[in-house]
Amino acid sequence: MSSPIAAIDTDVLTTVNLIRTGHAITRQQLARSTGMGRNTISALINTAIAAGLIAPNGSAPSTGGRAPATWRFRQESGLVLTVGVHTSTLRLAVTDLAGHPLEHRTLNWPITRGPEATLARAAAELQEMARGHEPPAWAAGVSLPGPIDQDTGRPSSPPIMPGWDNYDVVGALEAALNVPVSTGNDVNIMLLGYASALPDQASREPGNILYLQVGTGIGVGIMSNGHLHLGAAGAAGDIGHVQVSGVDSVICRCGRTGCLEAVAGGWALLRDARRAAVEGLSPHLKECLDQRGELTIEDIVVGVNAGDTECVTLMVRSATAVGDALAMLVSFFNPGRVVLAGPMPQGCPMFLDVIRRIVDERALSLATTDLEILPAASGLDDELRGCALLAVDSVFTAATA
């Protein structure tokens, strides 16, 4: 499956990609980065302009002589189709080449419907959405809530995705959308999107980040010195199924017992919240359940903020378990920043306060001296942007290989 830029000279695309990523935006910087002469760089720039891939972008500050001209990547010259597969929803978007959404939709769609129906619906919706936009689609990116085989892009024994194991997600969507498709684990994609939006995109400081998603499941994205760390088999950061001491009798959705997710994940909180509502331990949760017949994490957050004792107990229990695991990770990895995404850390200050206290008490003092622990502005926005960037990065990698 080829992209719209596959036929363009690789030196031109290398030049464009340096500009796109912000690593070199003047002729001088491009010459230093590529080792090419200025005349060659000028010719490559002219070709890239004619192809509609870059455009003039003013001047850089002068260092003594004439201010050097700068260039920008024309992110408006193409589209990316993004798919976020979640346990109960399907998030679809059409973005520009920098991941800015032009149109998006969220469908109520349980992951248990399986890959064939899910991807067919995603492809049909995206085709309809893309018809309203003029630039061509370059690629598609897919975020999946489970481990991904790095060589094939297929889900690898995902504990909460029945029927998805080893399914050819890439092949199915490429056939339906007729564009190159890239897949990634959801929390890694969120971290990619988060890091790309940091103020200094050239250095992307801090370059050592843990991005912790506490949603239905629990996972961590790891960025080391500005590079996403996936592990030998792509399983790095899958902490939701590590064992928690003292809870050996709690059964996890993966079939094992005592997993962190089974104690602190969103589905575990909802399990315990329903029990509290049915038994009358929480008037707030009982009222929510009676009104709608179901409970959400947001119901628990509202209960915490209203002072409901049982909701506070549930939230503190989850935050304590997550904080214990995070303290170990902080001591081991020594990140400069920890970002927490999901309805609990983003909507409940108490959840963050408990985690900060536990990490400060139990992690190595040297590792916590300058550590930032903060909530994500929007994990879903990070995911959407990360999906698009993964897809465009893959297009340039394939075209310049």
Image (cartoon, rainbow, N blue to C red):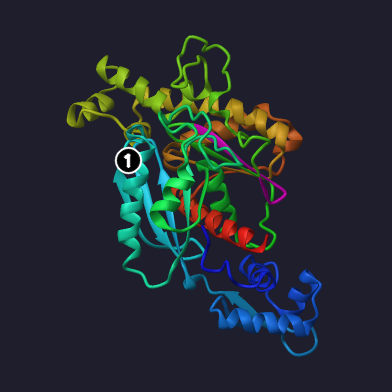
- Look at the picture and state if 75 lies above or below 315: below
In the displayed orientation, state which residue is furthest to the top.
Answer: 249
The residue sitting at 35% across, 21% down in the picture is 271
Looking at the image, can residue 379 be seen? no
Whole-percent x, y for residue 47 in the image = 62, 81
Residue 44 sits in which quadrant?
bottom right
Whole-percent x, y for residue 63 in the image = 78, 82
Is residue 23 in the magenta section? no
Whole-percent x, y for residue 390 in the image = 55, 54
- Look at the picture and state if 124 lies above or below 33: above
Looking at the image, can residue 282 be seen? yes
The residue sitting at 54% across, 47% down in the picture is 189
Q: Is residue 37 left or right of residue 179?
A: right
Whole-percent x, y for residue 127 in the image = 34, 59
The residue sitting at 74% across, 74% down in the picture is 30
Residue 239 sits in which quadrant?
top right
In the displayed orientation, state which residue is furthest to the bottom.
Answer: 66
Is residue 221 in the magenta section? yes
Three-letter code for the amino acid on which mark 1 is drawn = Ala
Disc 1 marks which residue? 117
Between 398 and 383, the one nearer to me in the picture? 398
Q: Is residue 191 left or right of residue 262?
A: right
Between 5 and 209, the one nearer to me in the picture? 5
- Look at the picture and state if 389 lies above or below 316: below
Under circle 1, the secondary element is helix
In which quadrant will I find the C terminus? Answer: bottom right
Q: Is residue 379 left or right of residue 29?
A: left
Residue 392 sits in which quadrant?
bottom right
Q: Look at the image and give the residue range highlighted in magenta.
A: 218-228
